[in-house]
Image (cartoon, helix red, strand yellow):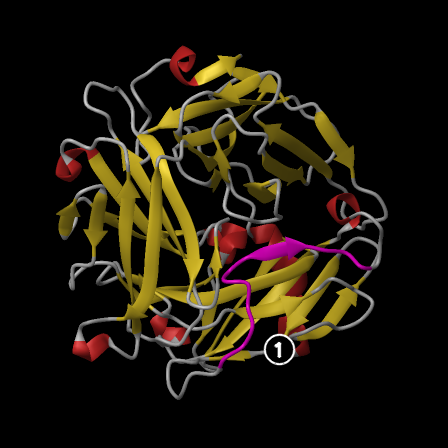
């Protein structure tokens, strides 16, 4: 067993490095294996939803680390997108004040870390690049001013607030799902004229800022004067899932929450978590989580950004195969809930155990296990996590309006709510 652990801790991180894709996509994506810990949030609150008000003093904070260290010539551009994240058919003059691209000049080298890296940071809007209309935006980072060398694509939102949203989270109205699903009902209150809400207005509902959960609403159940109601019994039902699992590596001198062992030498740090078990049976157990979020923290040093260590984190899940043909993954906001080689788990049939090692920056992390069934092509967390109505989740509602005669979709409403508290950001 000790030999197996040693192989997993020290070799597995190397195997995850792969070649980059050659073309940008309009999704949250990292294209180079040396780029880690991409953060994007409203600067008023760390790791908040990256939404800012149009023509306000609010900014987006965007940052990432380059594990090759040194200094690179990273450039960025910002593009406006439609409500479904297609590139808008307008020019940068229509949606930007200033320039359409610029170089990232704010960077700092890591210090007192076994693995060297360079931390890059950017704020938007800035004196060079400033969005001037509401809507979806994609930030694209590339090397040496060449857009054929993609590094990162990152979504963010600019809100031109014209609609107020009231919403509630309740049990599913489907009898069979009342104990496992949560339903979102919401009402849009507006004073602006909306001649055809069935054609010109779209509302997108998302759970825990996970784009894989998006549900699109194009037809209100009721149209009233200055009010649109969305409460159809067959829409906006979400699996409640379970509270996220978590671990704490704020200190590498002491074992934090869910940390079993810490292995450290002059060149690397590796962390072994306690073995997880499947939670798809039994009753709901409430625990505090961050709804899939993560926070970079280092209590052993003074600067989280440049003194936090990179660690190989060993995940182990004791479970049988949910179906005959599929793959298991560790997911959370730290990897945008994506399924890739880096977070794919290996299955040991003799031990009935999944395991994998992921390179992460020191801090606090929420995570869960997802199963991709290759036969049905469905990805679900229920086979490992279960699903309960009582689970505390956050939901984001984005409302887009395509004004008659306009050439773009404008984000005119946004709210962020949970079944524990209501939070406007």
Please identify the quarter of the rendering in which residue 207 is found: bottom left
Residue at left 43%, top 52%?
416
**Residue linked to disc 1:** 274
User: Does any portion of residue 278 appear in the rendered image?
Assistant: yes
Does the magenta stretch mainly form a helix, a strand or a loop? loop
Q: Residues within 10 Å of mark 1 (few under 14, many from 20)?
A: some
Q: Is residue 10 left or right of residue 347?
A: right
Q: Position of residue 290 (x, y in %)?
A: 55, 63
Up-down relation of residue 195 to residue 302 (above or below): above
Q: Is residue 287 magenta?
A: yes
* Residue segment shown in magenta: 286-299
Q: Which residue lies most toward the bottom here?
A: 282
Please identify the quarter of the rendering in which residue 409 is found: top left
Under circle 1, the secondary element is loop
Residue at left 48%, top 83%?
285
Q: Which quadrant is the N terminus positioned in? A: bottom right
Residue at left 77%, top 34%?
108
Q: Position of residue 238 (x, y in %)?
A: 30, 64
User: Does any portion of residue 145 appear in the rendered image?
Assistant: no
Up-down relation of residue 60 to residue 290 (above or below): above
Q: Position of residue 343 (x, y in %)?
A: 50, 57
Q: Is residue 114 left or right of residue 211?
A: right
Q: Is residue 214 magenta?
A: no
Q: Position of residue 111 (x, y in %)?
A: 84, 43
């Amino acid at each position: 067993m000790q030999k197996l652990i040693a192989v997993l801790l020290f070799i597995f991180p190397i195997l995850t490095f792969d070649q980059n894709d050659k073309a940008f996509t309009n999704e949250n994506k990292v294209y180079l294996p040396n780029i880690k810990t991409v953060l994007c949030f409203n600067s008023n609150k760390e790791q908040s939803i990256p939404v800012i008000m149009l023509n306000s003093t609010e900014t987006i904070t965007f940052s990432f680390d380059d594990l090759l260290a040194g200094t690179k010539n990273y450039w960025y551009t910002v593009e406006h997108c439609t409500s479904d994240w297609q590139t808008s058919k307008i020019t940068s003059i229509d949606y930007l004040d200033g320039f359409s691209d610029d170089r990232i000049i704010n960077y700092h080298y890591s210090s007192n870390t076994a693995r060297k890296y360079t931390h890059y940071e950017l704020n938007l809007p800035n004196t060079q690049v400033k969005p001037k209309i509401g809507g979806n935006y994609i930030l694209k980072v590339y090397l040496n001013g060449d857009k054929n060398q993609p590094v990162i694509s990152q979504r963010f939102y600019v809100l031109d607030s014209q609609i107020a949203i009231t919403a509630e989270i309740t049990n599913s109205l489907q009898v069979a799902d009342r104990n496992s699903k949560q339903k979102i009902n919401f009402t849009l209150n507006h004073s602006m004229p909306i001649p055809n809400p069935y054609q010109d207005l779209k509302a997108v509902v998302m759970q825990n800022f996970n784009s894989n959960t998006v549900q699109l609403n194009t037809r209100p159940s009721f149209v009233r004067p200055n009010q649109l109601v969305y409460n159809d019994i067959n829409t906006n039902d979400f699996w409640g899932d379970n509270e996220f699992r978590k671990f704490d590596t704020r200190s590498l001198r002491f074992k934090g929450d869910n940390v079993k062992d810490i292995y450290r030498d002059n060149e690397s740090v590796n962390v072994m978590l306690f073995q997880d078990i499947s939670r798809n049976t039994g009753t709901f157990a409430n625990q505090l989580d961050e709804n899939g979020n993560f926070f970079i923290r280092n209590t052993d040093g003074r600067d989280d950004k440049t003194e936090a260590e990179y660690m190989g984190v060993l995940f182990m899940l004791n479970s049988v195969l949910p179906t005959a043909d599929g793959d298991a993954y560790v997911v959370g906001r730290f990897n945008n809930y994506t399924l890739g080689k880096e977070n794919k788990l290996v299955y040991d049939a003799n031990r009935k155990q999944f395991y994998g090692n992921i390179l992460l920056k020191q801090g606090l992390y929420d995570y869960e296990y997802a199963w991709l069934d290759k036969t049905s092509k469905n990805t679900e967390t229920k086979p490992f996590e279960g699903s309960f109505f009582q689970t505390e989740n956050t939901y984001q509602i984005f409302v887009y309006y395509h004004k008659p005669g306009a050439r773009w979709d404008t984000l005119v409403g946004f709210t962020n709510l949970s079944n524990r508290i209501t939070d406007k950001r």
